[in-house]
Image: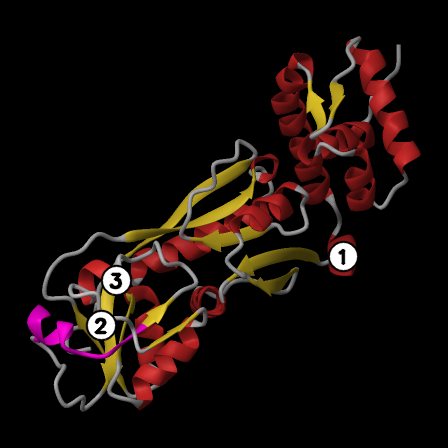
Amino acid sequence: MYDIDMSTIHVFLTVMDTRSVTLAAELLGSSGASVSRALNKMRERFNDPLFIRTKHGLEPTAVALNITPNLSRALASMQQAISTSGSVSQDDRRRIRIKLCASPVMEFYLLQALQAQQYNFRHVTLLTETHDGDLSKDISRLRARKIDLSLTPQKYADWTIANEPVMEVRPVVLCRKGHPRIGPGFTMAQLEQEEYLSSTMWPSLFADNEVLNPRNKMPIYSSTSLLNLMLLAATSDSILLCSAHFARPFARLMEVQVLEMPESHAVGTIYAHYHKSRSAEPHIMELVDYLRRYAADQDVLPQGR
């Protein structure tokens, strides 16, 4: 009977995530032979093949699926115990790195949230990649641990990925101060006559066709960059429909007005996505909590903006 240690369990869980010995070896910085040896130890210990090779990759057996939640929790508990018991000098030598994937405006909002709440950056390094809108790639990267946390307005239909609601978002109108037609108390009829800008990164966040396009009028400009659209709205007579959470910080930097919609419309939700096996990692959960608290504090639109 073979004993199994933390490293063997880690290998098994990585193969469960990737369904590939080759990819697991790449993520672990190991060789395929080392991963195979670790899997053989697990097979001997549980008297089960654990994975069946198919044309779509390795498919876990019923035993593998049954033992994964307990092993995942056990490994996370051990890693947390080791992390919290380390000395200060060890913590100083090895900063924790958290890799994020977010749109540029979400990244800007996140950093504002952390700075406003005096987040402790001394032991954590945040690395951010710009999200390109490819949801399937995002899920694959989360499963393979190539990114630690992703922030999008979509729920992911994958059993290994957590969908943690961070904030509810609602549309507001952003336009330049001194706009000749749009100001406080504007009507929907006035809004329908305006030339508008449209964000294409997350088209499902707001149904702008229902709000601004009642007669099939096309936007004069669309972009995946909400920051660029905000700048265009600030320097022209075009208007932009965007989230109140994102518009308000921008209004502190540029001469724009943020106006509430005259009629209520459905809100969207921004989710934090991470691999479920990482739910016991305090730094990831702390980051999500900081963002959620800041969003709740900023949830009232100031009068006159």
Residue that numbered label 3 is attached to: 208
Q: Is residue 105 visible?
A: yes
Cα distance between the residues tagged 3 and 1: 46 Å
Q: Quadrant of residue 53?
A: top right
Q: Which residues are magenta?
A: 186-197
Q: Is residue 281 above or below residue 108?
A: above
Residue that numbered label 1 is attached to: 94
Residue that numbered label 2 is attached to: 173
Q: Is residue 254 left or right of residue 146?
A: left
SS for dot 2: strand
Give 211 or 294, whichever is nearer the viewer: 211
How packed is label 3: few (under 14 Cα within 10 Å), some, or many (20 or more)? Answer: some
Q: Amino acid at mark 2?
A: Val
Q: Position of residue 7 (x, y in %)?
A: 81, 32
* Scheme of image coloration: secondary structure
How packed is label 1: few (under 14 Cα within 10 Å), some, or many (20 or more)? Answer: few
Cα distance between the residues tagged 1 and 2: 45 Å
Q: Quadrant of residue 97?
A: bottom right
> Given this view, does label 3 or label 2 mark the residue nearer the observer?
3
Where does the N terminus fall, quadrant-wise?
Answer: top right
Q: Amino acid at mark 3?
A: Asp
Give 254 or 22, whichever is nearer the viewer: 22
Q: Position of residue 169 (x, y in %)?
A: 30, 57
Q: Is residue 23 left or right of residue 194?
A: right
Q: Is residue 187 visible?
A: no
Magenta span contains residue 194: yes
Give 233 or 285, whichever is nearer the viewer: 233
The reply to whether discs 3 and 1 touch (Cβ–Cβ < 8 Å) is: no
Q: Is residue 1 above or below residue 166?
A: above
The furthest residue to the front? 216
SS for dot 1: loop
Q: Amino acid at mark 1?
A: Arg
